[in-house]
Amino acid sequence: MKTQLLITFTTEDKSNADVTAIKTKFVLFSKKIFVLTLENSDELVISYNIVPSSSSKFLPNTIMVHRKRETNTIYTINALNRLIQHLNGGKLDRGYVLNWEDYKNGVLLTTETGFKFLRTNIYDVVNVE
């Protein structure tokens, strides 16, 4: 079964409404929704795994991501490529071995000039029945 891992950026005031929208709008694969805090930010990130359908439309401020299970690192492919280029003298090498422990419990995202890494902490775990 094909799934998609999504994260929605939100605020504390909107997080409950966003979680409710996620629960009603999508078929969730893992039956858990993770609400995470971001270091040095007032934003929260809601992480959830959906079973996509032809009618699936992302919520505002949502992106598709990947996760390295062993280190609980959430990342976009573009951010991963920019990080590898940064660490590898500007060269993108798909065989480059990244030390994932350096990016444990965090989110790796692109910026206009490169990438950023933000540590995360669990704010809430919502079990979906």
Image (tube, grey):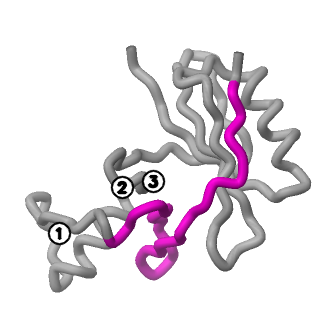
Which quarter of the rendering shows the C terminus? top right
Mark 3 vs 1, N-terminal side: 3
Q: CA distance from mark 3 to mark 1?
A: 20 Å
Q: Circle 1 sits on which residue?
A: 92
| Direction right: furthest residue | 13
What is the number of the mark on residue 71? 2
Residue 7 % position (x, y): 59, 46
Q: Position of residue 10 (x, y in %)?
A: 76, 55
Depth order, front residue of 79/129:
129
- Viewed as shown, does residue 65 lie left or right of 24? left
Hey, what amino acid is under mark 1?
Leu
Which region is colored magenta?
102-127
Q: CA distance from mark 2 to mark 3?
A: 9 Å
Q: Give the percent coordinates (x, y) of residue 93.
A: 12, 66
Of tags 2 and 3, the one toward the viewer is: 2
Q: Dot 2 surroundings within 10 Å: few (below 14), some, or many (20 or more)?
A: some
**Which residue, given by chain and number where applicable, does mark 3 sit on?**
74
Residue at image position (41%, 77%) is 114
Amino acid on which disc 3 is placed: Ile
Q: Nearer the viewer, mark 1 or mark 2?
A: 2
Secondary structure state at the residue bearing disc 3: strand
